[in-house]
Image (tube, rainbow, N blue to C red):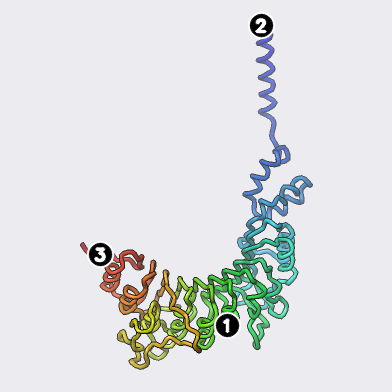
Amino acid sequence: GKTSNAAKRVKIEEDSKEFHYFIPGLLNLSDDVLLIIFSYVDPLDLLSLSKCSQRLANISCDKTLWERVDLRPYKMSFCTLKKCVQFLQASTKFLATQGFANKRSSNSHPTIPKSILRAVARNAPNLTTLILENHIIDSSKLVLEDFPSSVEHLGIRNCIMINLPQERSYFLKLNKTLPKLKVLDLTGNEWFPTHSLLALSKSSSLEELILTGCNVTDALPYASLAANFGFCSLKALDLRNTNVSDIEVTCFNRMSTLRHLYLCGRGTGEIDSQNIDTEVTDYSIVTFGSVPGEGGRMARGGAGGVDGGAEVIILQVGSFQRSPCKLETLVIRNYRGITDVSLRHAASFMKSLKFIDVTGSGCSEAGILDFKNARPEVCIKPDIATPL
């Protein structure tokens, strides 16, 4: 008994010493443990790990590691990007990349090659989100048909477009080439031509259009036709920092599916009496939620504004008629021409409204308090406490 116990104790102490000096390496871990570790590794490091051994290469290619691939934190050459694209699989749903383009050096970097998007479509046939940021796109070489047809969310953000066709829209066949598209984000693309609104409006699947930072001016004929005859599924329209004016905004009331409208002035929001057509005022907002015979008409500049002339007229083309939209979200920031008139109209006629933002506008504290009392269920910004 005592001898055998002493022998066991010596054996345990020896094993403990051996374990104490044992330093496990990466390859001593199981595949399951390595897979968990690799899930915290960025794509570029996965590329490096795949070159170390066949075992690590197999684990680095696991489909769970390439479901969502966001390469925007890394500005990489197209050569490196091509290597990353080779790892995409049928499980890949999200891909985002960032290039080197900026407004100061539009021609100093290469354009994104067609071969990359074709490889994306081939390797990731179930891709639903594709975001390209700060890339230079040569429209004569990379056409809309080169984008993966499976995409539901397409972002072309802050990109530079060269060789843009003058006789037709770059998005001419959007409804056929991207039949599943639900969200189109064109943020920061000053090259966006207003006539492209017509091409975009033909998409029967498009639910959200983001044109933040684009130049949407002098767009009345295109906005009118698009709003009256297209955008049959559009729910959200973002026109912040676009220089859009009253005359275009009034058209969008004819989009019966529209639920969320975002408008924001570029500058201080001060009304310029010499350039009223680049300002959003009560003139356009009072058309929303109104139907003929239900009010909602006012003289241009009726809120102490600039021109007491023409009334608001909802532009209608032909005999085709749509019901006015039922806005749930209305953001009209940094427009001094937005006053308590808009708030009173929203309180009375926008029955579906859930959120309104008039920050930086000409609305008074009293007007905001009156709106809160009339529509307590609606969230309003800026929020002003009700006096006790």
Q: Position of residue 327 (x, y in %)?
A: 42, 72
Q: Is residue 253 left or right of residue 146?
A: left
Residue in front for this viewpoint, 95 or 182 = 182
Q: Amino acid at mark 3?
A: Thr
Q: In the image, is residue 125 above or below residue 33?
A: below
Q: Position of residue 162 (x, y in %)?
A: 66, 80
| Residue where numbered disc 1 is placed | 198
Q: Residue at x 78, y 46 (%)?
A: 53
Q: Amino acid at mark 1?
A: Leu
Q: In the image, is residue 23 above or below residue 319?
A: above
Q: Residue at x 68, y 15 (%)?
A: 10
Residue depth check, mark 2 versus mark 1: number of the one nearer the observer: 1
| Residue 252 seen in the figure | no
Q: In the image, is residue 328 above or below residue 315?
A: above
Q: Quadrant of residue 119?
A: bottom right
Residue depth check, mark 2 versus mark 3: number of the one nearer the observer: 3
Q: Quadrant of residue 87?
A: bottom right
| Residue where numbered disc 3 is placed | 386
